[in-house]
Image (tube, grey):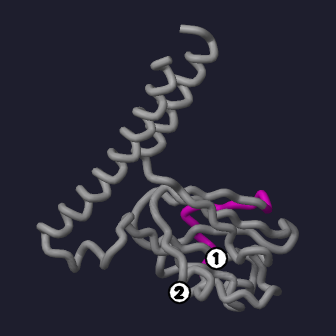
Amino acid sequence: MGSMKKTLAISCFMMALHGVSMASTVYQVGDSVGWTSMGGVDYQDWAADKNFHAGDTLVFNYNIQFHNVKQVTSQDFETCNATFPIATYTSGSDAINLERLGHVYFICGFRGHCLAGQKIDILISPVTSGPSPAHWPLSSRSSASSDLYFNKLYWTLSVLVLCLSQFAY
């Protein structure tokens, strides 16, 4: 197989694999304003219209002289207690991968910033297109996930057929 055909084959294989995996999204917290106590961003409103999933990434952009990011427990989130964080980020451009389902809580650890609203509760939910899985009967949950699986499988097979047709000449 020539070098060009080998490269094309590898590209096709990678595209097919990508079709099976779920796409992830990168969110910049606070959009263009970023992570700040001065921008008038309501971070809960910002998060409310987004669907976060495992594999997505949050990017916190901020001035390191005035802010940081601390991942905290729900109790510390409620009380704005930054004393015992689960994790602390201080780079000024932190990319945090969302890995598990449920709530993840972030606050700014600088005095008074969390109380001023520099805090965010991110709910990471399963990838679905309908109501939450807890409300589905078992049969429709399995058919919904199998529909998603077969849609991905169909896309993957379409990519492979298209790619393999390139080698037929």
Q: Residue at x 57, y 60 (%)?
A: 25
Q: On residue 93, which mark appears? A: none
Task: Decide if residue 39 is on the left or right side of residue 44.
Answer: right
Residue 29 x %, y %? 68, 72
Asked if residue 158 lies left or right of residue 64, the reply is: left
Residue extending farthest to the front is 169
Where in the figure is residue 36, as x and y percent of width and height? 78, 79
Question: Vertically, is 11 above or below 22?
Answer: above
Q: Residue at x 19, y 62 (%)?
A: 143
The crowd level at tag 1 (other Cα within 10 Å; few <14, some 14-19, many 20+) is many
Q: Quadrant of residue 50?
A: bottom right
**Which one is nearer the viewer's eye here, 169 or 72?**
169
Q: Which mark is residue 78?
A: 2
The range drawn in magenta is 81-92
Q: Is residue 64 above or below residue 32?
A: above
If you read the primary sequence from the N terminus, does the residue marked by circle 2 or circle 1 appear first?
2
Q: Is residue 10 above or below residue 149?
A: above
Identified by mark 2, the residue type is Glu
Residue at left offset 34%, top offset 46%: 154
79 over 99 or under it: above or below = below
In the image, 23: left or right of 28? Answer: left
Spot occupied by residue 111 in the image (x, y as percentages of width and height): 75, 82
- The CA distance from mark 2 to mark 1 is 10 Å
Mark 2 neighbour density, 10 Å: few (under 14) some (14–19) many (20 or more): some
Q: Which residue is mark 1?
A: 107
